[in-house]
Image (cartoon, rainbow, N blue to C red):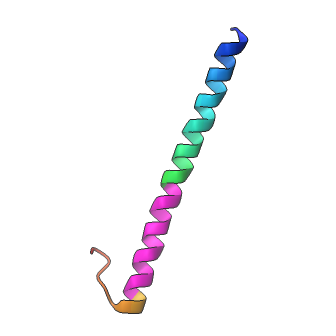
Amino acid sequence: MNIIMWIVIILGGILGIAVTLGTVAGMVGVIFYKVYRKMRYGISLYD
């Protein structure tokens, strides 16, 4: 393979990992935020 193909493969892998980590961090953040609201204000976890 030529060098440009390797660069595209590496950049695609990095982008895929970054998107996955961002999605997971967002989900964890939403869960913690919902638990915080439940404990602090008594709001349902489903709202």
Residue 2 is left or right of residue 24, and the answer is right
Q: Which residue lies furthest to the top in this view?
A: 1
Q: Is residue 37 above or below residue 18?
A: below
Q: Which residue is drawn at 49% across and 65% down?
A: 28
Q: Position of residue 9 (x, y in %)?
A: 62, 23
Q: Is residue 37 above or below residue 20?
A: below
Q: How many marks overall?
A: 0
Magenta: main secondary structure: helix
Q: Where is residue 17 in the image (x, y as percent from the top left)?
A: 58, 41
The quarter in which the C terminus is drawn is: bottom left
Q: Which quadrant holds residue 42?
A: bottom left
Q: Which residue is drawn at 72% across and 13% down?
A: 3
Q: Position of residue 45 (x, y in %)?
A: 32, 77
Q: Where is residue 32 in the image (x, y as percent from the top left)?
A: 47, 74
Q: Which residue lies furthest to the right in this view?
A: 3
Q: Does the magenta stretch include residue 37?
A: yes
Q: Give the range drawn in magenta.
A: 24-38
Q: Residue at x 70, y 8 (%)?
A: 2
Residue 15 is left or right of residue 31, and the answer is right
Q: In this view, does 11 lie above or below 24?
A: above
The quarter in which the N terminus is drawn is: top right
Q: Is residue 36 magenta?
A: yes
Q: Which residue is drawn at 58% across and 29% down?
A: 12
